[in-house]
């Protein structure tokens, strides 16, 4: 067992939430956890890195796009256990909203992303290959009229 598979502590991560014309920017995860699932771009916060900088870095690494965050939507966590009940993954995820008007670049998957695209919220919610956190954020966006606030904290 490696410490990556069975962590002793929760891992801090970010998710870059970009909504444009009721379409959510998503990537298909190339590696565990969530390999093959459509998810909001994001990843682990590096030591010494500020939350908003981590979100900008993950957005660029996974989608080829740059943009400016316009706030923190909230906080959620993902805990996955193995067959024996041991914690395999535990992420504490800061949901960072981006202003779609600030996006620059060409959408091109790279890094941990096998693919990247804009998915309409309704289509995303009808799929069975969507990460749990991404589905929860999409449900909130669909209900809230395309805009979230800190009152929409998940988990």
Image (cartoon, helix red, strand yellow):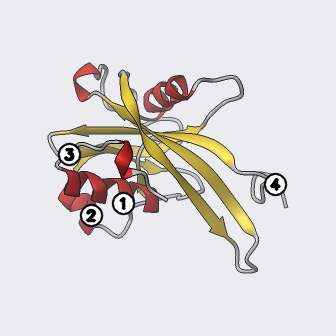
Which residue is pictured at 76% across the width and 80% down the height?
84
Residue drawn at 36 percent across, 48 percent down: 151
The CA span between labels 1 and 2 is 6 Å
Q: Earlier in the sequence, mark 4 or mark 1?
A: 4
Determine the secondary structure under disc 4: loop
Q: CA distance from mark 3 to mark 2?
A: 14 Å
Q: CA distance from mark 3 to mark 1?
A: 14 Å
Q: Which mark is residue 155?
A: none
Q: Are marks 3 and 1 in contact (CB under 8 Å)?
A: no
> Which of these two is toward me, 141 or 153?
153
For label 3, count other residues whose C-alpha is less than 10 Å away and answer few (under 14), some (14-19) or many (20+).
some
Q: Earlier in the sequence, mark 2 or mark 4?
A: 4
The image quarter containing residue 80 is bottom right
- Residue most toward the front? 151
Depth-wise, is mark 3 or mark 1 nearer the camera? 3
Residue 65 visible within the image? no
Residue occupied by mark 3:
146
Q: Which mark is residue 8?
A: 4
Would you say residue 81 is visible in this rendering?
yes
Mark 2: give few (<14), some (14-19) or many (20+) Cα within 10 Å.
Answer: some
- Nearer the observer: mark 2 or 4; the answer is 4
Q: CA distance from mark 4 to mark 1?
A: 27 Å
Q: For residue 65, which quarter of the picture?
A: top left
Q: Are marks 1 and 2 in contact (CB under 8 Å)?
A: yes
Check residue 125 in the rendering and tell me which mark sits there, or answer none: 2
Quickly name the residue at label 1: 135
Asked whether the residues under the numbered discs 4 and 3 touch, taking CB atoms below 8 Å apart as contact, a structural biologist would say: no
The picture quadrant where one finds residue 73 is top left
Residue 105's place in the image compared with 151, above or below, is above
């Amino acid at each position: 067992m490696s410490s990556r598979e069975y962590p002793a502590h929760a891992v801090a991560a970010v998710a870059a939430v970009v909504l444009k014309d009721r379409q959510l920017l998503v990537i298909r995860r190339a590696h565990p956890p969530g390999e093959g699932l459509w998810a909001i771009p994001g990843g682990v916060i590096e030591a010494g890195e500020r939350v908003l900088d981590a979100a900008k870095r993950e957005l660029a690494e996974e989608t080829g796009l740059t943009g400016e965050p316009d706030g923190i939507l909230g906080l959620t966590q993902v805990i996955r256990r193995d067959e024996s009940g041991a914690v395999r993954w535990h992420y504490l995820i800061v949901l960072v909203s981006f202003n779609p008007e600030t996006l620059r670049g060409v959408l091109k998957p790279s890094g941990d992303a096998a693919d990247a695209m804009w998915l309409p919220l309704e289509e995303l919610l009808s799929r069975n290959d969507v990460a749990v956190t991404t589905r929860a954020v999409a449900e909130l966006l669909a209900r809230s009229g395309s805009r979230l606030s800190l009152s929409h904290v998940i988990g």
